[in-house]
Amino acid sequence: MPIIRKNDVAPERPIIIVLYGTPGTGKTSVATTADNPLLIDTDRGYDRAVQRIDTLEASKWQDIASEYATFKGYKTIIVDTAKALLDDYLSVFAVEQNYKLASNSLKRFGKMADDFKMFVNTLRSNGSDLIFICHDKETADGDIIKHAPDCTGQSKDLLIRIADQVGYICKENGKRTIRFEPMDNFVGKNVAGLGSLVIPDNTDPDFSTFMAGIIKNVKLSIQNRSEAQRKANDTLKNLREQLTNVATEEEAAALLDVSQSLPQIFKKPFFEEIKKVLSDKGFVYDGKTKRFHLKEEKNDTAA
């Protein structure tokens, strides 16, 4: 597998989205507005969606694993629900492969995780985006009700870890909304930095491509972030070249000013790098003026 260099722009890749929410918020209906979707129905609920799409009714893991070739024809694979797939189908399948795993939950989950990752990687290698639908699980923390995707602890952690976006579907002011940004009272994940999104009514023409639009925006955001990272690395490389050639206070000040254009994550480490390199060149940093001065010049002034 080739090494992706730090200045390479990441190619567009399939993404993974987790949607969860309370019953009746239209999770499945929203997911079906993705591009060329196939629904893997493990929850016997495909007929509750407002629009019908190609559907695989699965009652066990083998029903899904036997259709890998079929999945290649679809741009988006929707799993409804992730809990049934992970906690039920894959758990049973693991024990069927090795009965000793029935009494060893740790090793059983290891087998489940391996099979699940193979499933995800196979679909992603086909170029398919994945949407996992979960019910909402509420837990009380004092007076606060917290919301999270309904899977057992290890399954939920695995699902959230591989996801690019985790969205909570709820009703706000009478309108259905997806919120991806994590909050104190609900689990979220927002790699793309999307704001709170109002879901159009299913009679609205915009509804039919709503999830396709979200997926497109997430991919664009990831690529833009990659491009921004590449530009930041280029800037940092140029600044380091300038740093090696700094000989005057004016050059040090100019370098310090330009370094402020770096992303926040780079600013402090590079500033520490500047201080170390310039210290070896005879500079000291004045916290009051926020400028570097040559030690010799300060001594001359004092005299």
Image: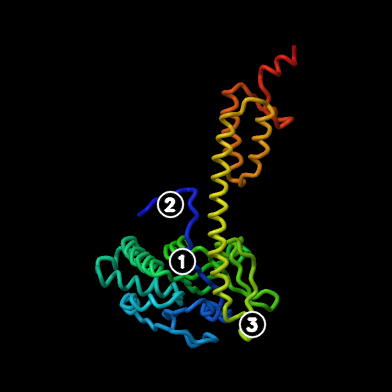
Instruction: Say which residue appears at 48% left-offset and 67% top-offset.
Output: 16
Left or right position of 301 against 273: right
CA separation in Å, label 2 and label 1: 17 Å
Q: Mark 3 and 2 residues: CB-CB less than 8 Å, in contact? A: no
Left or right position of 300 against 209: right
Instruction: Say which residue appears at 47% left-offset and 79% top-offset.
Output: 37
Toward the viewer: 217 or 11? 11
Residue 123, horizontal then vertical, whole percent: 39, 70
Amino acid type indicated by mark 2: Ile
Residue 90, horizontal then vertical, whole percent: 35, 71
**Foreground: disc 3 or disc 2:** 2
Toward the viewer: 204 or 2? 2
Helix, strand or loop at label 1? It is loop
Mark positioned earlier in the residue sequence (3 or 2): 2
Mark positioned earlier in the residue sequence (1 or 3): 1
How packed mark 2 is, by other alpha carbons closer than 10 Å (few <14, some 14-19, many 20 or more), is few
Amino acid type indicated by mark 3: Asp
Instruction: Say which residue appears at 26% left-offset and 72% top-offset.
Output: 96
How packed mark 1 is, by other alpha carbons closer than 10 Å (few <14, some 14-19, many 20 or more), is some
Residue 143, horizontal then vertical, whole percent: 63, 64
**Foreground: disc 1 or disc 3:** 1
According to the picture, the residue beneath numbered tag 2 turns out to be: 4
Q: Quadrant of the C terminus?
A: top right
Amino acid type indicated by mark 1: Pro
Left or right position of 158 against 34: left
According to the picture, the residue beneath numbered tag 3 turns out to be: 201
CA separation in Å, label 1 and label 3: 27 Å
